[in-house]
């Protein structure tokens, strides 16, 4: 048995781990699962227990990787499911293409992005990742394979997008890319003094900016509640680049991450996070327009630190991400006030807007706001605080992101995801014997 965990490093599980070396072997691996079932795992960036199965089989898909085909005219690319976003970007950016959307790390697999139906800073403009998938090949419980498309098999396709790997492993995917004129983004940055101004600027920016995100100081209270740094922008055209970049406008070569040694538990406390937050807020410009930033700096800043999750020490941390509909600004304020009053030691709190939901019954993003933050585990009653906030969210018609969850009350899931039974029906057709199982699915009773 091998110990595995999510990116938050809590909880841990012991499981048999296999690493198939081909798509066929990946599809057949599940046939070796015992009574505890199997789940596919990518690069381990889901935060909780979505990609682990205690006492069961974990199928590591990272060896099943590679770009199979790229049409340079249409920007349609076919890749194996274990291909990392890092490798994909290294292949497509120099050719003038970018993915339809990217999460906050490039160290995820294509299969994992589909399973979580990831979203990014541009959801209000371009939707979640599933909107950019043209077709996929998934493994079946008997070790075979099946092709899914939005038009030909819509129920199975959308049950898989956001289905947390519970409909089978993604062996292969065909994606539609977005053309770009350079590998630099023109970014507008504003230092925002309070929550009301932030919400107004985020909503106003939806029509003007494709990408938008705000970092929030969750230790600020009173008149400074919700003070933040707002970053908005889009890819710059080649003729906007400085001479040193204009010679090769599509250059893309991210620096290797700097290793982070394990931190002692308690390193991230109110004092250290307060100091960091003050520095981060004060160093941001009050107003800056059109600054050219690289793809790693704008989209994946934490990837500069290898193993940054170890900063939280041996006890790990909990990630919490919620969605609240537009019109629930009072409830959003309640969440932020509760976190500030608790003295939440999170230096990674971000707020974004979301656009319309895609057809996936378990897909997280929906029109409104999304707040995400990290909290060290093992300190104050973190689970109790987050469960109180979950109740605020569900009463307002919102939901939690399953790919980041490690604490949610299973009784709230049907209210957060009212199409859960619909998803279960499709999932049961795809996997009638429930071979595909995870600790997340069992904890939240997703499969009934």
Image (cartoon, rainbow, N blue to C red):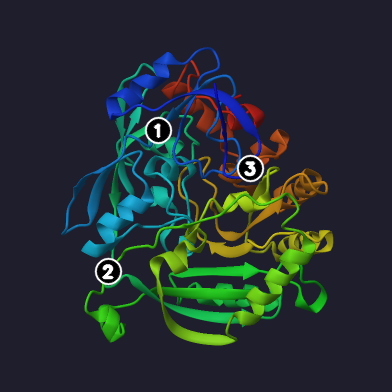
Nearer the observer: mark 2 or 1; the answer is 2
Q: Position of residue 39 (x, y in %)?
A: 48, 27
Q: Is residue 335 left or right of residue 164?
A: right
Q: Which residue is mark 3?
A: 405
Q: Which residue is mark 2?
A: 251
Q: Is residue 397 visible?
A: no
Residue 298 is tagged as none
Label 3, secondary structure: give it. loop
Task: Work out whether residue 192 or residue 358 is closer to the camera in this orientation and state it.
Answer: 192
Relative to 367, is 192 above or below? below
Residue at 43% x, 50% y is 107
Residue 156 is tagged as 1
Residue that extends furthest to the front in the rendered view of this protein: 261
Crowdedness near tag 1: few (<14), some (14–19) or many (≥20) residues, C-alpha within 10 Å:
many
Label 1, secondary structure: give it. helix
**Rounded to the nearest whole Å, what is the CA distance between mark 1 and mark 3?**
24 Å
**Rounded to the nearest whole Å, what is the CA distance between mark 2 and mark 3?**
36 Å
Q: Earlier in the sequence, mark 2 or mark 3?
A: 2
Q: Position of residue 74 (x, y in %)?
A: 19, 57
Q: Earlier in the sequence, mark 2 or mark 1?
A: 1
Nearer the observer: mark 1 or 3; the answer is 3
Q: Position of residue 190 (x, y in %)?
A: 57, 81
Residue at 60% x, 32% y is 440
Q: Quadrant of the N terminus?
A: top right
Disc 2 to disc 1: CB gap under 8 Å: no
**Rounded to the nearest whole Å, what is the CA distance between mark 2 and mark 1?**
38 Å
Crowdedness near tag 2: few (<14), some (14–19) or many (≥20) residues, C-alpha within 10 Å:
some
Task: Work out whether residue 300 or residue 276 is closer to the camera in this orientation and state it.
Answer: 276
Q: Earlier in the sequence, mark 1 or mark 3?
A: 1
């Amino acid at each position: 048995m091998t110990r595995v965990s999510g990116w938050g490093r809590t909880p841990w599980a012991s499981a048999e781990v296999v690493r198939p070396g081909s798509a066929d072997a990946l599809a057949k691996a599940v046939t070796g699962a015992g009574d505890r079932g199997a789940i596919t795992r990518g690069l381990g960036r889901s935060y909780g227990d979505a990609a682990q199965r205690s006492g069961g089989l974990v199928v590591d898909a990272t060896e099943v990787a590679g770009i199979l085909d790229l049409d340079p005219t249409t920007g349609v690319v076919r890749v194996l499911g274990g291909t990392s976003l890092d490798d994909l970007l290294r292949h497509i950016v120099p050719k003038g293409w970018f993915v339809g959307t990217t999460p906050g790390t490039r160290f995820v697999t294509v299969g994992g992005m589909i399973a979580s139906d990831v979203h990014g800073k541009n959801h209000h403009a371009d939707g979640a990742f599933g909107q950019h998938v043209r077709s996929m090949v998934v493994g079946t419980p008997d070790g075979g394979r099946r092709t899914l498309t939005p038009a030909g098999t819509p129920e199975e396709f959308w049950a898989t997008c956001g289905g947390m790997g519970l409909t089978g492993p993604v062996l292969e995917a065909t994606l539609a890319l977005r053309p770009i004129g350079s590998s630099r983004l023109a970014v507008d940055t504003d230092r925002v003094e309070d929550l009301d101004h932030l919400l107004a600027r985020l909503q106003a920016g939806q029509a003007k900016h494709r990408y938008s995100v705000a970092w929030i100081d969750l230790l600020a209270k009173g008149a400074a509640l919700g003070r933040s740094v707002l970053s908005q922008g889009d890819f710059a055209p080649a003729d906007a680049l400085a001479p040193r970049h204009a010679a090769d406008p599509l250059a893309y070569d991210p620096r290797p991450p700097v290793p982070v040694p394990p931190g002692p538990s308690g390193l991230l406390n109110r004092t250290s996070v307060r100091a960091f937050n003050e520095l981060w807020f004060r160093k941001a410009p009050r107003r800056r327009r059109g600054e050219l930033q690289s793809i790693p700096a704008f989209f994946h800043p934490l990837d500069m630190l290898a193993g940054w999750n170890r900063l939280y020490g041996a006890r790990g941390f909990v990630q919490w991400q919620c969605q609240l509909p537009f019109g629930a600004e009072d409830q959003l304020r309640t969440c932020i006030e509760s976190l500030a009053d608790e003295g939440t030691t999170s230096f990674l709190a971000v707020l974004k807007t979301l656009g319309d939901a895609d057809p996936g019954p378990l897909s997280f993003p929906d029109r409104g706001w999304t707040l995400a933050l990290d909290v060290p585990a093992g300190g104050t009653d973190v689970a109790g605080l987050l469960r109180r906030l979950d109740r605020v969210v569900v009463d307002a018609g919102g939901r939690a992101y399953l790919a980041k969850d490690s604490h949610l009350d299973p009784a709230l899931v049907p209210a957060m995801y009212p199409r859960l039974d619909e998803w279960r029906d499709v999932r049961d057709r795809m996997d009638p014997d429930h071979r595909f199982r995870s600790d997340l699915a069992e904890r939240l009773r997703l499969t009934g």
